[in-house]
Image (cartoon, rainbow, N blue to C red):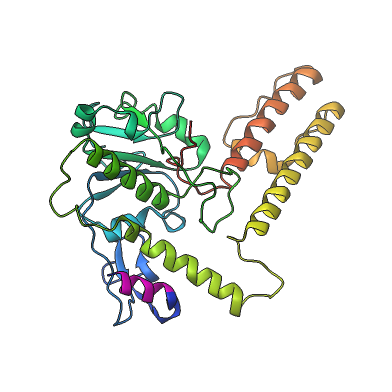
Amino acid sequence: MEQASSAAVQQPTAWTRGPCTSCQRSYKFYCPKCNIPLGAPDNVTVPALKLPLQVHVWFQDKIKKSTAPHAKVLAPQDVQIVPYPAKGGETLPTYTRENAVVVYPSFEAETLEQINAEELRDIRTLIFIDCPWQKAPVIMTDPAITDLRHVKLAQPPKESNFWRYHKAGAGCVSTIEAIQLMLEEYTAAAKRAEISLPEGSEDTQLSDLLFFFKLQFSRIAEHFETEADPERKPPMDADEKERRRLMYSQRIRERSDDSRTNCRLGRRAPRRFKLANSHRPQRRANVTVGATTARRTTTTRKTVHSHAGTASKLAISAPIAA
């Protein structure tokens, strides 16, 4: 299996793009909607994994940008992607405080090694929240999970290997990285507590959860080495990440300066700040200039925060160590 994984990573261009056998949409590596592998070379075997815990990913974002489908493709029996909010008569899963924990870096979050053996033995499901950061607090108030305990990584990596730009910084990882790391920590904690793992999961190489992650990473790096402008650096490069963070910070400062200037002059806020709130009815009553300016200033700040939050595609399960 390790040889197959290495071959896949070393030759990502050997994979072919083609229509999904279920939905007929064209993808490379896997279908993110049907969660099946596509176009694997003859000498590559896609891992089929048995996990020590059930993994539920509460999802509210664009599925093609997420790494959550990686886990579903590789461990279809143990991973469930839960669209949020539930639509079309669908219902959310039911959990108890004893059998499920939410991977979320709140102030009261514990590490798995801090949970006593009896409570650890009862855990059956890890719940991950995959959405833009500003939506997470709202999801966490859902009655299905609001009373569940929170857990976090004991030793998060200093930097994610995720290739998309993110402003969250050290200690934050993508969804599939968080799943792999949390399951590694659970396995270690279970062995220390002498808890038996589910049959078939004892020999699972949890690093294989990064099969498609490494494959996509390798393909992007290869593209920048051979096909892209030689002056451009790949998005996962440390210098490039820092450059994008600085550019993002500069844009935020410029928007903030523009907002303050408009407030002082009593001008209408630029349209780019109003798009996220365009559905809200505008109050047109006779009011003083000062009141109008103050109200628009508040709207502007909220909208800037909204735009900032959507710049990152990291899992909410990316905990920062205590």
From what the image shows, is residue 274 above or below residue 244? above
Residue for point 22% across, 47% down? 52
Q: Quadrant of the N terminus?
A: bottom left
Which quadrant of the view contains residue 206? Answer: bottom left
Q: In x, y percent, where is residue 246? A: 72, 48
Q: In x, y percent, where is residue 168? A: 57, 42
From what the image shows, is residue 147 above or below residue 131? above
Residue 148 falls left or right of residue 50: right
Residue for point 44% across, 30% down? 138
Between residues 320 and 137, which one lies in front from this camera angle?
320
Q: Is residue 8 magenta?
A: yes
SS assignment for the magenta stretch, majority = helix
Residue 130 falls left or right of residue 239: left
Residue for point 23% across, 42% down? 191
Outermost right residue: 265
Between residues 71 and 172, which one lies in front from this camera angle?
172
Q: Is residue 261 magenta?
A: no
**In the rendered image, is residue 143 in sight?**
yes
Residue for point 15% across, 47% down? 198
Residue 124 falls left or right of residue 165: left
Between residues 96 and 268, which one lies in front from this camera angle?
96
From what the image shows, is residue 240 above or below residue 121? below
Which quadrant of the view contains residue 108? Answer: top left
**In the rendered image, is residue 82 in sight?**
no
Q: In x, y percent, where is residue 127? A: 32, 39
| Span shown in magenta | 2-9
Q: In x, y percent, where is residue 239? A: 68, 58
